[in-house]
Image (cartoon, rainbow, N blue to C red):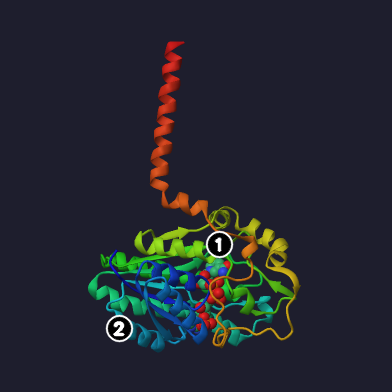
Amino acid sequence: MTQRTIVVTGASAGVGRAVARAFGQRGDRVALLARGQAGLEGARADVEQLGGEALVLPTDVAEASQVEAAAAEAEQRFGPIDVWINSAMVSVFSPAQEIQAEEFERVTRVTYLGCVNGTLTALRSMTPRDHGAIVQVGSALAYRGIPLQSAYCGAKHAIQGFTESVRCELLHDQSQVKLSVVHLPAVNTPQFDWVKCRLPHKPQPVPPIYQPEVAAEAIVWAADHYRREWRVGASTAVVIAGNKLAPGLGDRYLASTGYGSQQYDGDVEPDRQDNLFAPQDDVHDHGARGEFSDRARTRSWQFWASKHRKVLSWTAAATGGALVAWSARGARQR
Ligand SMILES: NC(=O)c1ccc[n+]([C@@H]2O[C@H](COP(=O)([O-])OP(=O)(O)OC[C@H]3O[C@@H](n4cnc5c(N)ncnc54)[C@H](OP(=O)(O)O)[C@@H]3O)[C@@H](O)[C@H]2O)c1
């Protein structure tokens, strides 16, 4: 396979780290954007060990000028960008009324505007060459807001609206640059160890939980196989479809279950550190996975079916046709 230039934001940990590894395994040249030096160096070691080339670019994605400078450095070293993945995020787990204005602003600047900065920087590189793929790392929460994550859900919804607008513009211009979103289920990442948290108990991803490698496989697939949106995990598909059908029922269901399902055993440590304004992986590398491996799934059958939906539909149609023909023949013989 030809070696490509890939940019991954949020590459030092969690989903972005698993994505960087997956591209490294394909021998690609991967530019790694995040803030924490130890996490970035860990990602560099992973990519190089797996056979790819890596470039560490400490960047705060909330700052457009830093994102542009990182892209310029990546292109100077590796050549024109083929694929850009927007994975960086921060959040605050808290009732909305307790979130400070500067915290809402920071989540929005990193999670939403970080994605805008990444997308516009990628487009400036890709549209003149009429080539490239941008993948937004989305979430079921881009469609369905849940309690205790209002700042993050707002940012994820905003990414959805922004991406649809830009995709229309690309189609209007008959551009060959592809812009897609991969909506993820709950993923076992370090996010839950370092997210800013005002909950009484330790935060957790809402089960079912998947390993970040499942997300990475889908994101790498999406970069190669264009579809406007991919959904990973049956829970993601059900949440998105269910919210279209009965959003009011969703409100009530989440009001009664959403507090308990986002917390698990043990109290939040009083001295808990968070990564909202400064990285927590500057000194210690946290890697891709969080602490929920014993509960995390290593495969999504729903995504497998989604990847192969054409073959599965043809097989279902052919089987249905054969059954109809067989029963009609049986009826004639009787
Ligand atoms: N985990 C889940 O349950 C889940 C579910 C659905 C969707 N997702 C999506 O998956 C993506 C990754 O989430 P995750 O769970 O992997 O989060 P994570 O474990 O907290 O990792 C977040 C990454 O973003 C980086 N980052 C944070 N602030 C940054 C900034 N200002 N500039 C540059 N990089 C920054 C972090 O590195 P530094 O701190 O070193 O900068 C880290 O590499 C997000 O888009 C999220 O919406 C996650």
Q: Is residue 48 left or right of residue 153?
A: left
Q: Which of marks 1 and 2 is nearer the N terminus?
A: 2
Residue 275, relative to residue 205: is it above or below? below
Residue 77: mark in rendering: 2
State whether label 1 is within 8 Å of ligand 1: yes
Disc 2 marks a residue whose amino acid type is Arg
Residue found at x 45% / y 75%: 46
Secondary structure at numbered mark 1:
loop
Of the residues tagged 1 and 2, which is closer to the observer? 2
Residue 220 x %, y %: 41, 64
Residue 185, which numbered label? 1
Q: Mark 2: which secondary structure?
A: helix
Q: How crowded is mark 2: few (under 14 residues within 10 Å), some or many (20 or more)?
A: few
Query: Is 128 positioned to the left or the right of 324 in the image?
Result: left
Q: Do the residues bearing badges 1 and 2 touch, measured as CB atoms within 8 Å?
A: no
Question: Where is residue 9 drawn, in percent x and y?
Answer: 44, 77
